[in-house]
Image (spheres, rainbow, N blue to C red):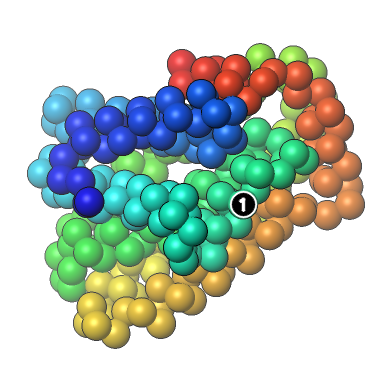
Amino acid sequence: MPIDDIDEVIQNLDRIIAQAAASGSRLGYFPALYRKVTVQVARGIDDGHFEDGRRMERLDILFANRYLEAFERYGQGKAVPASWRLAFDAAGEWWPIVLQHLLLGINAHINLDLAVAAAEACPGPELAGLKNDFDRINRILAALVDDVKAELTTIWPLLGWLDRLSGAAEDVLINFSMTKARDCAWQAAERLAATAPAQRGSIVEELDSQAAAIARVVKRPGVVAGTVTRLIRLGERKTVREVIEILSR
């Protein structure tokens, strides 16, 4: 059932994380990161950091519901957006590194879900008033991704050395730009907000197709970058449970 407050979002993420840790499923990687985002947004609302806290809570709930619904439907063997299916399917594969798993989830959630949630939270001309808070929530996500990169060095210590030497940790997935993704999400939200809800289906399908194309690049980034990710993966010695615990700190 759809949730209707941020505390329920956190409770549902806790449930998914705990189940994934117990079963050793990589499906717990993304929600461990996403929980941090949700907690930061909740604190920002309580502290008055957003222009409209009630509107931001509504957006956060709509945003989270899209991920939670996709997760539950996937577990039930039902149809989910292609971008989410690629992210979820990757959890059953050995080769993707932790950073790839995180970016696959971020990709589907930003490039598809964020635009849809924003248009639903602020339909039509109301969307323009959301822009500043929209940018704030994206900055929170970007900052946490940087923090997670530091945490990943505890999973594979040489990652920090490699990053300082050549920037490879970022160059591995150079085709995925957080800044571009956020800008595209806002542009997509503007398109959706200007379209009647009954006619948004084709736009949502287009966004999902584009996000799925990005996901395929993230999973298989080419010969050079792919070689780097394989070297990183061979050095990732932590168990899935240990990785989830690190990401949940």
Residue 186 position in % (x across, y down): 37, 61
Residue 205 position in % (x across, y down): 45, 75
194 over 52 or under it: above or below: below
Structural crowding at the residue carrying mark 1, measured as other residues with C-alpha within 10 Å and reported as few (<14), some (14–19) or many (≥20)? few
Query: Does any portion of residue 80 appear in the rendered image?
Result: yes
Number of callouts in the render? 1
Q: Which residue is mark 1?
A: 89
Q: Nearer the viewer, residue 52 or 7?
A: 7
180 over 230 or under it: above or below: below
Residue at the spot 77% in from the left edge and 40% down from the top edge: 95
13 over 87 or under it: above or below: above
Q: Is residue 20 found left or right of 231 in the rendered image?
A: left
Q: Is residue 248 found left or right of 55 in the rendered image?
A: right
Which element carries disc 1, helix, strand or loop? helix
Q: Determine which quarter of the picture holds residue 130.
A: bottom left
Q: Determine which quarter of the picture holds residue 227.
A: top right
Q: Nearer the viewer, residue 189 or 100?
A: 100
Query: Does any portion of residue 109 appear in the rendered image?
Result: no
Residue at the spot 31% in from the left edge and 74% down from the top edge: 192
Residue 216 position in % (x across, y down): 68, 59
Residue 164 position in % (x across, y down): 76, 23
Q: Is residue 62 found left or right of 74 in the rendered image?
A: left
Q: Nearer the viewer, residue 153 or 21?
A: 21
Residue at the spot 63% in from the left edge and 66% down from the top edge: 213
Q: Determine which quarter of the picture holds residue 18.
A: top left
Residue type, numbered disc 1: Asp
